[in-house]
Amino acid sequence: MIAYPTESVYGLGCDPLNQLAVFRLLYLKQRPVEKGLILLASDIQQLLPFITPNASQLKKLTTIPDKPTTWLVPASSLAPDWITGRHKKLAVRITQHKTARALCDALGFPLVSTSANRDSRPPAKTALKVKQYFGNEIDFILAGATGKLDKPTEIKDLDTNQIIRPG
């Protein structure tokens, strides 16, 4: 499990196919598995095993938005339920954040991405705050600056453009 800077806050992440790591992350966050998680990637190729977008959805997903956006996309049969939760769609984001993007590039796969905080606390915006929240419970903290967003990214449904979570 790793903590890393994103567009707005520090994220907690792990390999989405490592069920043990995902459940460890959920336990630390005190987050129920039913809520589902976001996958953060450096490019669409990292996400394609987990989602089933049609041609127009694919174009929308690969267009760099004015502001960072997390999209709800139909999940593929390979997307594990410990990532999708109770949903048929998966939340995904192709990040433009330099450090998060480099991390996904280096790994070669997308990361689970959820804010670095316990369920009721404000998300960490610094490596120091992550350390204060989690101590040695996280394997590595990748220090770096978060992006300029004040709040976590907006979440929108890719089909309807409905805003699920304002940014």
Image: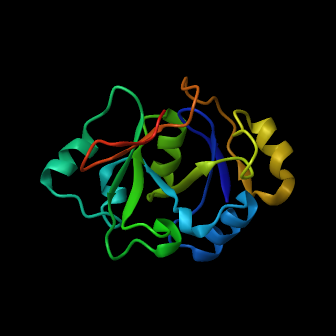
Left or right: residue 125 compared with residue 151: right
- Which residue is most to the left? 55
Q: Looking at the image, which is closer to me, 120 or 97?
A: 120
Q: Give me the residue at 36% from left, 67% from top.
A: 88
Q: Position of residue 46 (x, y in %)?
A: 36, 57
In the displayed structure, would residue 31 be above or below residue 146? below
Q: Give me the residue at 36% from left, 66% from top.
A: 50
**Quadrant in the picture for residue 70:** top left
**Colour mode?**
rainbow
Q: Position of residue 11 (x, y in %)?
A: 62, 46
Q: Position of residue 65 (x, y in %)?
A: 32, 31
Q: Looking at the image, which is closer to me, 115 or 13?
A: 115
Report how many numbered discs are placed on residues in the image.
0
Q: Position of residue 10 (x, y in %)?
A: 65, 40
Left or right: residue 93 compared with residue 83: left
Left or right: residue 25 compared with residue 101: right
- Which residue is most to the top? 148
Q: Quadrant of the N terminus?
A: bottom right
Q: Give me the residue at 69% from left, 37% from top.
A: 143
Q: Give me the residue at 20% from left, 50% from top.
A: 57
Q: Looking at the image, which is closer to me, 144 or 165?
A: 165
